[in-house]
């Protein structure tokens, strides 16, 4: 795929053709490098392979689980739709925490790349670094002491934990933009907000999305710890499997977590491909 | 002189550019005692293409960017069409000033059409008018609208990108155009072509263009007037290319002009401006006897044979026909080079030097023969030109000195203070 694209770029339009061309619209400005149909970025392999694998995994787990020998304790752990409840909680934890991460990190990243606040960026990054460097479970314990047991503490912990990748990528994405482009945008009369909206953010989208993807996957993982703060989630299944020494329950919780993480990562990768501005080079 | 010949007077009348006045424009950066641009005062006429040229780091780009206030001047005033724009909203100001930069500055995530339509969209044009304008602009810069409309900048060559960059700068029809080394990043052949295109555009549009470059040859080729800048944007000389070439103000300017000023001067004059001499001709349809007669009667021992469409075909010497036994097909030497009346004297000189007899036919429409330029005519006209330039320059200098003396006198009397206070 990549090779094909590159040949198109280099073979496409030799400069020499330009030189001899008389002015006028019939000027043959180099051989036309194919009609500008951007290549399809979402291939069918991309669309099908991972979901198929996940389906197979879940099916296998279900079959194994049905055949497994469950005693009353194990049965109890999964009774009354407990599995569904935990799965739902887990998804809610992930979605809500990611939402807050985006709401906090992206605007913060934008602010920290504005000229006036630029000097503050290293300090803020350092703080965010502390958030991520702290062991999540320790952070959660501290937050539970402060906020009490429940989903709230878990959410705050997850947000603190996942802010860094999005923040760092937003800043990196905005900084990576060629300053002459920003100057060109200002030079043709865009307002500061216009430059941000029409030029800077679209160009930073690939990196920002990469950060969001990292944060999402991190959050699915961290959400298993929410159980220790009474926040629910699939961690509940895993923990009860361990404490009661019931293998099937433990495996069920783990497989569901892994499957969820992979699914979320897959969806995020699709979003990356679809939301990436056209014209930025397909990769 | 060359300029006036190319530009018909009625065209010059409908100037669409605006005047630009820079008054004591200064830029200081904090922490640096010496200003980056020191007190530049300059008048740029409407419809004029002024080139800022100077060594890198001399502040020419800074000076230009102060005109659209991408860099805010520390002090001084900018007037465009008489209006003081030093204090107005910079965003509003910039929408009236086209801006084209090196390596085009196109936004990679927008198509060619989206890039070009940016300024019209921001200024609130209707959709239909914008669409029409995009087609018009692509046409103007020599790109086929149908083909290039939907492309992304990545899919264009450097020269094409640069064209789109110029189209974008001109899209909202601004009276003033700033160009910051726009052709600096393309190969020499493409650059030459783009420069020709810019000259053509300017003949059509008559914008006021400020063009920054460090290439003096580019400056000579494009500029109506050239401002040679030295460090801190001090104007070493601000004059027509002819005057700078023939009479550089000081050592700095002559150093910048470089060697071969007389040769460069040849670039500024066209064949049409020098005498084209007549040459005995015959066409291949003429009977051989007439050609013989002409060869015998003519003052030269040579005729220029033209083909059926009156295009120069062969040089025929007296002995040639004998040797070829009367066959026109075999006799004589083929004409391998011709120049048009629009060619520069430099091109003509090149052709003359290559020709073993030192002359080259001049052709008009469809290659029809119009006359011949030879070494002698060229030498004479160049001598005349240089002499004329020298006289012009001396006179010009007198005038400048007188003006300066007058100004000093007025300042001493305090008469010039009043209008400044009013402003």
Image (tube, rainbow, N blue to C red):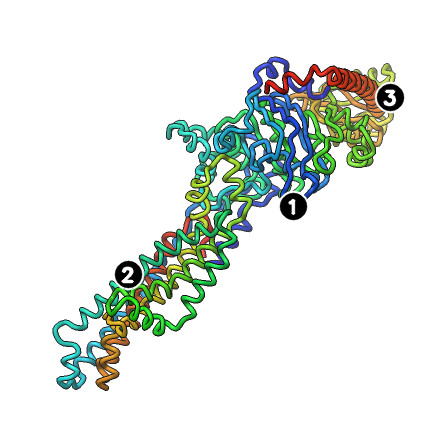
Residue B68: which quarter of the image? top right
Query: Of the residues tagged 1 and 3, which is closer to the observer?
Result: 1
Relative to A58, residue B363 above or below: above
Q: Which residue is mark 2?
A: A95
Host chain of mark 2: A
Residue B283: which quarter of the image? top right
Quadrant including the N terminus of chain A: bottom left
Q: Which residue is mark 1?
A: B31
Cα separation, mark 2 vs mark 1, equals 50 Å
Could you tell me residue A173's position as x and y percent? 47, 54
Host chain of mark 1: B
Could you tell me residue B29's position as x and y percent? 63, 42
Q: Are marks 2 and 1 on the same chain?
A: no
Secondary element at tag 2:
helix
Query: Residue at image x 73%, y 38%?
Result: B231
Q: Which residue is mark 3?
A: B301
Q: Is residue A65 left or right of residue B414?
A: left
Residue B221 appears in the picture as rendered: yes
Query: Residue at image x 56%, y 37%?
Result: B70
In primary-sequence order, the first of circles 1 and 3 is 1
Could you tell me residue B258's position as x and y percent? 80, 36
Q: Are marks 3 and 2 on the same chain?
A: no
Cα separation, mark 1 vs mark 3, equals 76 Å
Host chain of mark 3: B
Relative to A145, residue A176 above or below: above
Residue B218 appears in the picture as rendered: no
Query: Residue at image x 28%, y 60%?
Result: A96
């Amino acid at each position: 795929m990549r090779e094909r694209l590159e040949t198109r770029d280099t073979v496409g339009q030799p400069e020499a053709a330009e030189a001899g061309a008389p002015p006028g619209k019939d000027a043959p400005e180099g051989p036309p490098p194919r009609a500008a149909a951007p290549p399809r970025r979402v291939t069918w392999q991309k669309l099908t392979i991972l979901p198929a694998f996940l389906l197979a995994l879940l099916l296998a787990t279900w079959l194994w689980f049905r055949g497994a020998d469950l005693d009353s304790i194990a049965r109890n752990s999964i009774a009354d739709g407990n599995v569904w409840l935990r799965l739902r909680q887990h998804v809610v934890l992930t979605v809500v925490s990611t939402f807050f991460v985006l709401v906090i990190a992206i605007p913060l990243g934008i602010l920290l790349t504005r000229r006036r606040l630029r000097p503050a960026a290293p300090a803020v990054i350092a703080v965010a670094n502390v958030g991520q460097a702290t062991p999540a479970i320790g952070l959660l314990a501290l937050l539970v002491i402060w906020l009490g047991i429940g989903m709230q503490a878990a959410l705050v912990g997850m947000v603190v934990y996942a802010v860094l990748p999005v923040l760092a990528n937003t800043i990196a994405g905005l900084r990576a933009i060629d300053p002459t482009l920003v100057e060109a945008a200002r030079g043709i009369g865009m307002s500061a907000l216009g430059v941000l909206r029409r030029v800077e953010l679209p160009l930073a989208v690939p990196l920002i999305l990469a950060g969001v993807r990292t944060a999402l996957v991190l959050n699915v993982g961290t959400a298993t710890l929410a159980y220790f703060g009474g926040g629910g989630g699939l961690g509940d299944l895993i923990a009860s499997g361990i404490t009661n020494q019931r293998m099937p329950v433990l495996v069920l919780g783990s497989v569901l977590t892994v499957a969820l993480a992979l699914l979320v990562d897959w969806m995020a990768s699709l979003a990356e491909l679809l939301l990436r501005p056209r014209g930025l080079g397909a990769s | 002189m060359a300029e006036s010949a190319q530009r018909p007077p009625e065209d010059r009348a409908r100037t669409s550019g605006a005047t630009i006045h820079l008054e004591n424009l200064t830029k200081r950066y904090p922490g640096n005692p010496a200003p980056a641009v020191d007190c530049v005062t300059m008048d740029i006429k409407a419809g004029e293409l002024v080139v800022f040229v100077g060594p890198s780091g001399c502040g020419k780009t800074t000076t230009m960017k102060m005109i659209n206030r991408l860099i805010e001047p520390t002090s001084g005033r900018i007037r465009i069409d008489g209006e003081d724009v030093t204090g107005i909203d910079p965003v509003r100001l910039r929408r009236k000033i086209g801006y084209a930069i090196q390596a085009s500055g196109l936004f990679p995530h927008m198509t060619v059409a989206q890039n070009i339509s940016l300024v019209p969209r921001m200024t609130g044009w209707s959709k239909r008018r914008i669409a029409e304008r995009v087609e018009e602009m692509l046409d103007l810069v020599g790109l086929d609208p149908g083909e290039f409309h939907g492309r992304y900048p990545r899919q264009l060559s450097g020269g094409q990108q640069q064209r789109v960059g110029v189209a974008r700068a001109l899209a909202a029809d601004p009276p003033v155009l700033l160009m910051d080394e726009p052709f600096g990043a393309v190969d020499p052949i493409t650059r030459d072509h783009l420069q020709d295109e810019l000259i053509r555009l300017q003949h059509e549009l008559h914008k006021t263009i400020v063009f920054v470059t460090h290439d003096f040859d580019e400056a000579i080729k494009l500029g109506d007037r050239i401002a040679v800048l030295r460090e801190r944007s001090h104007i070493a000389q601000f004059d027509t290319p002819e005057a700078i070439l023939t009479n550089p103000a000081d050592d700095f300017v002559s150093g910048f002009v470089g060697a071969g000023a007389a040769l460069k001067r040849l670039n500024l004059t066209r064949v049409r401006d020098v005498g084209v001499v007549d040459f005995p001709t015959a066409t291949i349809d003429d009977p051989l006897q007439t050609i013989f007669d002409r060869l015998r009667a003519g003052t030269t021992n040579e005729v220029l044979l033209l083909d059926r469409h009156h295009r120069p075909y062969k040089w025929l010497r007296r002995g040639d026909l004998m040797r070829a036994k009367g066959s026109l097909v075999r006799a004589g030497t083929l004409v391998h080079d011709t120049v048009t009346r629009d060619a520069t004297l430099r091109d003509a000189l090149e052709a003359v030097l290559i020709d073993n007899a030192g002359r080259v036919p001049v052709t008009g429409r469809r290659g029809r023969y119009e006359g011949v330029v030879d070494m002698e005519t060229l030498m004479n006209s160049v001598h005349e030109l240089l002499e004329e330039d020298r006289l012009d320059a001396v006179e010009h200098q007198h005038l400048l000195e007188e003006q300066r003396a007058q100004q000093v006198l007025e300042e001493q009397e305090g008469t010039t203070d009043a209008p400044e206070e009013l402003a």
